[in-house]
Amino acid sequence: MIFIKKVGNRVGKNSPVISGELEKRKGAVMARYKTKYPGVFYREAQRKGWKGTERVYYVIFKKNGKVHEEKVGRQYENAMTPAKAARIRAERIEGKRRSPKEIREAAKAKAKRYTISRLWEEFKKQKQGELKTFDDYAYDYHKFIEPNFGDKEPDQIHPLDIDRFKRRVMKGKAPSTIRNKLALLSSIINFGASRRLCPPLPFKIARPRVENETTEDLTPEQLSRLLEVLNSDPNYQVAGAMKMALFTGMRASEIFGLQWRDIGFQRGFIHIRDPKSGTDQKIPLNDVTRNLLENHPRTSKYIFPGRGGRRRQRAEKAANRIKAAAGLPKDFRPFHGLRHVYASMLASSGEVDLYTLQKLLTHKSPQMTQRYAHLRDDALKRASNLAGALIDEVVNGKERAEDQSV
């Protein structure tokens, strides 16, 4: 038996159909064809993308006192059959399957929810012009955060996920490196929570404790070997950048962002734009740095550019190769370590006070420069001992002269 459904006021409910050739236009009567499965019927419809027609299956059932009629799939497009439709109907009655409307609403809700990737895009719009080191954040996000957390929402991240990240992804990395990556993840989530884009993380991410008082240094022999390698290395851009760190104490990010316009050859100063301390700084252009820059090729507006003359972002591979060739300790950090070497040499010389050293290193506060105070104290002790030796020499010499005159 064929039944048709009322559309408008033309046909009554369950009226028999004499002819199967009914119009398929919107608003027209569509025939309902029963199957051997209770509550399962189909209609004939134009096949999508092909000639001819196909069956479109529906189910009808009563639940919680309400009659539901739902489309469950097309014959060819969804490989739907009467038996499969009957199983879907049973699952709907038992509450094991959501309705198409519920699925659509869930998809809309999910599209509105913020994953870490969506939060990053918002974070980037806001912070790209504010953070001086945003390029470093972008590198860390795409290399470490996105592959591991990008498709997760904050409330889907659990302490176990953090533990796995530290154990698998960050294996062998320095505690400071792990701490920085986790700090970035926290910053992204906190940014979203502060703008009510997502709930805050329900737990505090445990970060490795970092000892910040490390002051790397090199012996005269190690420094000599390093300079020999730097002078002969084929990657003159990275070698030059490492020399710049040693000669000026500048940070790697400041060196990579340095442009030729920032070098005042006439007035003898280097203009550091957007340093970590916040405001632009100027440091003296010493003779050894002047000689380095005057003999360095100009291939870009940046002094030590990366590929295509663009601003360099990283130099870890070449710098680590140079470090190994010079036989430096494995835990020596090529750029940051050379900054420490520069500061240590000045502090231990006894000729530079900590205030001057703070200005040369562009430290924001004197507390950051205090790590070199013991070197300054050692220099003062040597100077004091030298004074004592000189006085002793004068006294002893006078006594010897008096003894000889008797």
Image (spheres, helix red, strand yellow):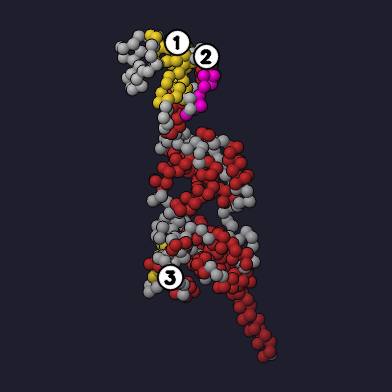
Which residue lies at the image location 43% right of the left edge and 19% below the top edge?
Answer: 43
Q: Secondary structure at mark 2?
A: loop
* Relative to 16, residue 365 above or below: below
Identity of the amino acid at label 3? Arg
Name the image quarter holding the N terminus.
top left
Q: Is residue 218 above or below residue 393?
A: above
Label 1 environment density (alpha carbons within 10 Å; few <14, some 14–19, many ≥20): few
Q: Position of residue 10 (x, y in %)?
A: 31, 12
Would residue 200 appear left or right of 4 to someone viewing this image?
Answer: right
Q: Nearer the viewer, mark 1 or mark 2?
A: 1
* Helix, strand or loop status at disc 1: loop
Does the rendering let one see residue 353?
no
The earlier-in-sequence mark between 1 and 2 is 1
Circle 2: residue type: Tyr
Check the image and name the residue furthest to the bottom.
Answer: 405
Q: Which numbered disc flags the more N-terminal residue, 2 or 3?
A: 2
User: Where is residue 11 drawn, in percent x and y?
Assistant: 34, 11
Q: Main secondary structure of the magenta part?
A: loop
Q: CA distance from mark 1 to mark 2?
A: 14 Å
Q: What residue is shown with label 1?
A: 1
Label 2 to label 3: alpha-carbon separation: 81 Å
Question: Relative to residue 180, is residue 47 drawn left or right?
Answer: left
The circle on residue 18 is: none
Residue 253, relative to residue 391: is it above or below?
above
Highlighted range, magenta: 77-84
The residue indicated by pointer 2 is 37
Q: Give the residue displayed 51% in from the left and 56% down from the top.
A: 367
Whether residue 79 appears in magenta in the rendering, the answer is yes
In the image, 122 versus 150, the foreground residue is: 150
Residue matched to label 3: 298
Amino acid type at circle 1 is Met
Helix, strand or loop under label 3: loop
